[in-house]
Amino acid sequence: MPDANPDQPDPANPDSPERAYSDFTRSLNYGDYLRIDTLMSAHQPVTQAHDEHLFIAVHHVSEVWLNLIVQELRAAMTLLSAGVTDTPLKMLSRVVRAQEQMTNAWEVLKTMTPADYLQFRSAFGRASGFQSAQYRMMEFLLGNRNAMLLRPHQHRPDLYGPLEAVLNAPSLYDLALRLLSERGLDIPPSVLERDFAQPYIQDEAVLAAWLTVYRDPERYWDVYELAEKLIDVEDNFRRWRFNHLTTVERTIGFKTGSGGTSGAGYLRKALDTVLFPELWQVRTEL
Ligand code: HEM
């Protein structure tokens, strides 16, 4: 008896694809639920250049991951501000994985050469990732505070309003410091009640508090775990930035950016940003 041909329909086989549902006149299917048509309708190249598809796709997937990251950060922060630490750790782990996906996207984009890029570069004028509202939201939530970065969103109150609200509220790190204070560690009122719209300034008392945690992790286990998770997040944040810079340099060299900055010089300077300064410093002190 010859073996059944795997290419032949075989409705009797429980693993046959013929068992799958095929009538969707009255029920939601994959594309309906996920609104794939709507999603794909955003993919609108404005030139005939082959690589513009790649350029748009990588930006789109990055924005989808940013959307998830912002959701997770917001949810984690709501719980942290209520003193809950276990579920936020899980959410931050997800943020870390999503950041990895964003960083890996550079590998795909790097297949585009400078000549490929020049075929469509002039088509998008002044548009730049610098104007990504979701990226700024992520940065503001993480604590990179700079009111100037709101300016490109002035013409969109629906984007400007939520960004401004987050700029003026405690960041993820501010909430972590609040938690340290609630655990009985000495965090000065000048830190706890600082003007949140201003960049965070490293503080000796905060460093001393983290040192206490890092010298006795068992006693302060949840805040210790949180601190290490924050290091993971900042580590990945830096990796994304570094890979962006390298991709920019290999694609446009040292030309000015479409968003109006010096380009690679601006991005290189941004690499100096430190989100959770005492958590890096504490390693030196241990
Ligand atoms: C070849 C591709 C790319 C080039 C040449 C490029 C170039 C640049 C340049 C020159 C800047 C500085 C701002 C300005 O435009 O003046 C910038 C900023 C930015 N780009 Fe890109 N970019 C590329 C791909 C991407 C992708 C795929 C994303 C994903 C979302 C992205 C997100 C951003 C963000 C968020 C900023 C602001 C960074 C900050 O202010 O710290 N870029 N880009």
Image (tube, rainbow, N blue to C red):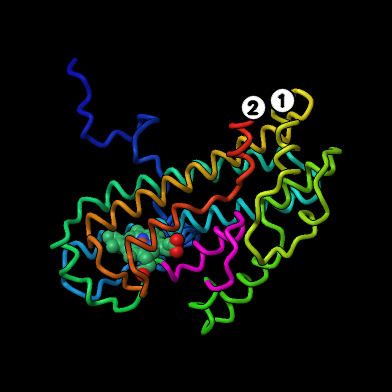
> Within 8 Å: ligand 1 and the Cβ of disc 1?
no
- Camera-side residue: 37 or 275? 275
In this rendering, which labeled residue sits more in front, label 2 or label 1? 2
What is the chief secondary structure element of the magenta stretch?
Answer: helix
Q: In this rendered view, identify the residue nearer to me: 44 or 95.
A: 95
Instruction: Give how far across and how far down residue 238 sits, in percent.
Output: 45, 47
Q: Residues within 10 Å of mark 1 (few under 14, many from 20)?
A: few
Q: Residue furthest top?
A: 1
Residue 151 relative to residue 194: left or right: left
> What is the secondary structure assignment of the residue under circle 2?
loop
Decide: is 107 above or below 248.
above
Residue 4 is situated, as x and y percent measured from the top left of the image, at 22, 24
Specify the quadrant of the image occupied by residue 5: top left
Does the rendering let one see residue 60? no
Vertical order, 106 against 26 (above or below) = above
Instruction: Write the residue at 28% across / 53% down.
Output: 247
Q: Residue at x 78, y 48 (%)?
A: 178
Q: Circle 1 sits on which residue? A: 215
> Is residue 63 part of the magenta span, yes or no?
no
Q: Quadrant of ligand 1?
A: bottom left
Q: Is residue 112 above or below residue 39?
A: above
What amino acid is found at the position of numbered circle 2 in the picture? Leu
Residue under numbered circle 2 = 286
Badge 2 crowding class, 10 Å Cα cut-off, few under 14, some 14 to 19, many 20 or more, is: few
Would you identify the image quadrant in which residue 208 lies?
A: top right
The span shown in magenta is 130-148
Q: Is residue 275 left or right of residue 203?
A: left
Q: Position of residue 259 (x, y in %)?
A: 37, 73
